């Protein structure tokens, strides 16, 4: 479902505006529920879509060219009848070869996940994932790759840079602000998205017209197994049936396609270089740094060095 009216935007230019606005104590914006259900995501470029890495335009050019065998497997899988709901009936109308491309993308995503999991298991860093088959085996039985989804493994891989079908958010707006400002460029707007999960859940229940149409679902992940999820107060979104949407229409849906003006906000972060530095200093004082959000020794070293670039007398 597409929202009927534009999602409200608020432009924030000074560090003071940013920190006054992006606090859960801002009841005028986020409501006065004892435990607010808002989640946030920061982008260093406001033009970027709310789209998981596997569905972005650069995914196949980045990972597909070095794996031609998986493309061959996808071609074979596309010739088979997939009985999974939402995929039936695509074959008669697939004149653009989208089904094959969708299966290739799913196969590469699966292979990336499997390689990550098996390497981590071999080093004693993970215990789960022993059941994962080779990607080509899953692809040559098309129904298997379509049905596969392991949110626990994908949520761990997502936090270590593996493209997945998940998009990560945080219950903490300042954590999202850190990711918006980190790597942002002078003269380019950053953005923090905010979504009221309670309002979204109500809207989704009212507007879901077909059980096999794409819909945004919420997944919290295993905070005991994933330290980064704990540190970032993380949560994930997943769009069900996005691949069948691509096979039918040639585009992958984005999360903003399913947000309405009633339960979403878009905060454009547009500080001067000085105000950006002041905001980063404030985040440092709030313990919102790479070390605190992605705790390991490498992050601690990075923060120790970056602290010398801040002017704490601003």
Image (spheres, rainbow, N blue to C red):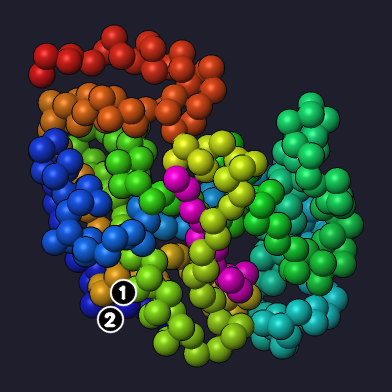
Residue at horizontal 42 percent and vertical 87 percent from the top: 206
What residue is shown at x 56% (from left), y 36% (from top)?
227
User: In which quadrant of the rendered image does the N terminus lie?
Assistant: bottom left
| Residue 81 in sight from this viewpoint | yes
Q: Secondary structure at mark 2?
A: loop
Whole-percent x, y for residue 31 in the image: 21, 64
Kindly identify the residue that appears in the image at 65 percent across and 56 percent down. 151
Residue at image coords 67%, 65% = 102
Span of residues in magenta: 233-243
Residue extending furthest front? Answer: 34
Name the disc covering residue 4, or none: 2
Say whether disc 1 or disc 2 marks the residue closer to the N-terminus: 2
Give SS at disc 1.
loop
The answer to whether mark 1 and mark 2 are in CB contact below 8 A is yes
Q: Where is residue 138 shown, x and y percent of the image?
A: 84, 60
**Which residue does the numbered mark 1 point to in the structure image?**
260
10 Å crowding of disc 1: few (<14), some (14-19), many (20+):
many
- Quarter of the figure that contains the C terminus: top left
**Is 289 a magenta residue?**
no
Q: Is residue 284 above or below residue 114?
A: above
Query: How far is mark 1 from mark 2, CA to CA?
Result: 7 Å
Residue 240 point in image, percent of width and height? 58, 71
Query: Residue 259: image x %, image y %?
Result: 36, 71
Q: Nearer the viewer, residue 10 or 48?
A: 10
């Amino acid at each position: 479902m597409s929202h009927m009216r534009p999602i409200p935007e608020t432009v924030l230019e000074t560090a003071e505006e940013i920190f006054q606005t992006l606090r859960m104590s801002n009841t005028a914006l986020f409501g006065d529920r004892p435990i607010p259900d808002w989640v946030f995501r920061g982008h260093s470029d406001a033009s970027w879509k709310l789209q998981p890495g596997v569905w972005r335009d650069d995914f196949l050019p980045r990972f597909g060219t070095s794996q031609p065998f998986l493309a061959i497997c996808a071609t074979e899988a596309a010739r088979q009848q997939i009985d999974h709901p939402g995929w039936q009936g695509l074959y008669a109308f697939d004149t653009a070869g989208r089904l094959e491309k969708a299966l290739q993308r799913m196969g590469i995503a699966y292979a990336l996940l499997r390689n990550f999991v098996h390497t981590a298991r071999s080093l004693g860093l993970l215990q789960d994932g022993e059941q994962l088959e080779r990607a080509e085996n899953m692809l040559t039985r098309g129904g298997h790759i379509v049905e596969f989804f392991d949110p626990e493994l994908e949520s761990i891989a997502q936090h270590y840079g593996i493209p997945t079908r998940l998009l990560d958010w945080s219950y903490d707006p300042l954590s999202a602000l850190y990711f918006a400002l980190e790597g942002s460029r002078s003269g380019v707007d950053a953005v923090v998205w905010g979504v009221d999960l309670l309002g979204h859940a109500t809207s989704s229940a009212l507007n879901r017209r077909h059980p096999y149409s794409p819909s945004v679902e919420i997944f919290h992940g295993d905070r005991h197994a994933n330290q980064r999820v704990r540190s970032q107060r993380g949560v994930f979104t997943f769009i069900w049936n996005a691949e069948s949407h691509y096979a039918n229409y040639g585009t992958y849906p984005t999360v903003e396609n399913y947000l309405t003006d009633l339960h979403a906000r878009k905060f454009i972060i547009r500080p001067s270089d000085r105000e950006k530095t002041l905001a980063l200093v404030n985040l440092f004082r709030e313990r919102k740094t790479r070390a605190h959000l992605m705790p390991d020794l490498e992050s601690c070293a990075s923060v120790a060095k970056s602290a010398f670039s801040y002017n704490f007398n601003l």
